[in-house]
Amino acid sequence: MHPLSGSNDWADMDGITVVKKVWNGRANLAEYKAEGAAGHVELLSLRWYNPAAHQWNLDFATPNVGVLGVPGTGEFRYGRGDFYDQEEINGRFVLVRFSIWPTGPDKARSEQAFSADGGETWEVNWVNTYERLSNNTEINWGREASTSDPHQHDFDFNPGIWHTEITRTGDPFTAPDQTMAMHGTVTVRRIWGGRAQLEEIEADGPKGHWEGLTLFLYNPKSHQWSQSFINSSMGTLDLPLVGDFKQGRGELYSEDTFKGRSILVRGVWSDIEQNGHRYNESYSDDGGKTWKQAFRANVTKTN
């Protein structure tokens, strides 16, 4: 209960974890809900594979924070996966390790541990023991996911299977007319009781097949949404775009780099109707005075 304080005070909880494959196993999504003497805990974890590094990334979110945290990165050796990152705990930055391994047929164990001495010693502070119930278990989120906040429903238009026509610009600043067209399918489903959505994109163009994955998370404190994107060929997570909707139009912003230069990124959701909508992404290298279109998607309902 009090990591890195010398305390040995533990609390027991009982709950359920649902893990679903994404990208045919190159990623997966875990939803977690548990109850105990210490209260109620909910978590969402997105795990994705980086084919270049041959490593996995594990990222977590909680219901009251609408963005993913710091991803732990690592790999499996001899059946055990260890993933590391650095986080601020009680005002100090420490190393964090998440480990998971099977303990028998349909059984597994995971642990979280902190190190305040650069990995020389580790203190375990969270232990999960798992036993599989079935392959098709769903969590009943009930009242925890319900809300009267209208902004949580800003992306309610998005779930479904859509046809998409994509136009990408190679360099919006120096060659805005050099574009590439792609056509494909977008599949969006609600997760975490409607507080999040998962989008899978598959498209084909002159350079072949392309896939993307977007996680949308709602932050009930700021009444804003974040969208975090992963390119399957790179296996890296972009910085999240964060923003909100006004009068049926969503604008989300982020900072990023393009060819070594710092830029602003703006994502706009517009022309939202029952049978389609538009998404445009633009870059700015002058602090938002001017914007150059980098990505456009016209999305329509499939027959």
Image (cartoon, grey):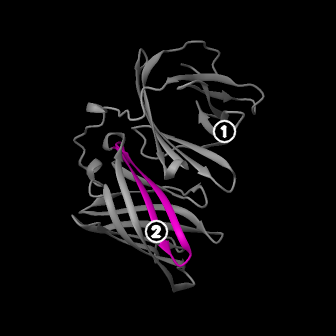
For this rendering, which residue is in front, 26 or 84? 26
As drawn, is 42 to the left or to the right of 88? Answer: left
As drawn, is 128 to the left or to the right of 165? Answer: right
Mark 1 touches mark 2? (CB < 8 Å) = no
Could you tell me which secondary element the residue under label 1 belongs to?
Answer: strand
Residue underneath mark 2: 203
Q: Let me know if residue 272 appears in the view.
A: no
- The residue segment tinted magenta is 195-222
- Kind of residue sitting beneath label 2: Ala
Could you tell me which secondary element the residue under label 2 belongs to?
Answer: strand
Q: Looking at the picture, does residue 59 appear above or below residue 163?
A: above
Residue occupying the far top of the picture: 8
As drawn, is 246 to the left or to the right of 252? Answer: left
- Kind of residue sitting beneath label 1: Tyr
Is 215 colored magenta in this rendering? yes
Residue 84 numbered mark, or none: 1
> Which label lies toward us, 1 or 2?
2
Closer to the chain start, of discs 1 and 2, is 1
Q: Position of residue 248 (x, y in %)?
A: 25, 63
Residue at the spot 44% in from the left edge and 61% down from the top edge? 201
As drawn, is 108 to the left or to the right of 19? Answer: right
* Image-quadrant location for residue 6: top right
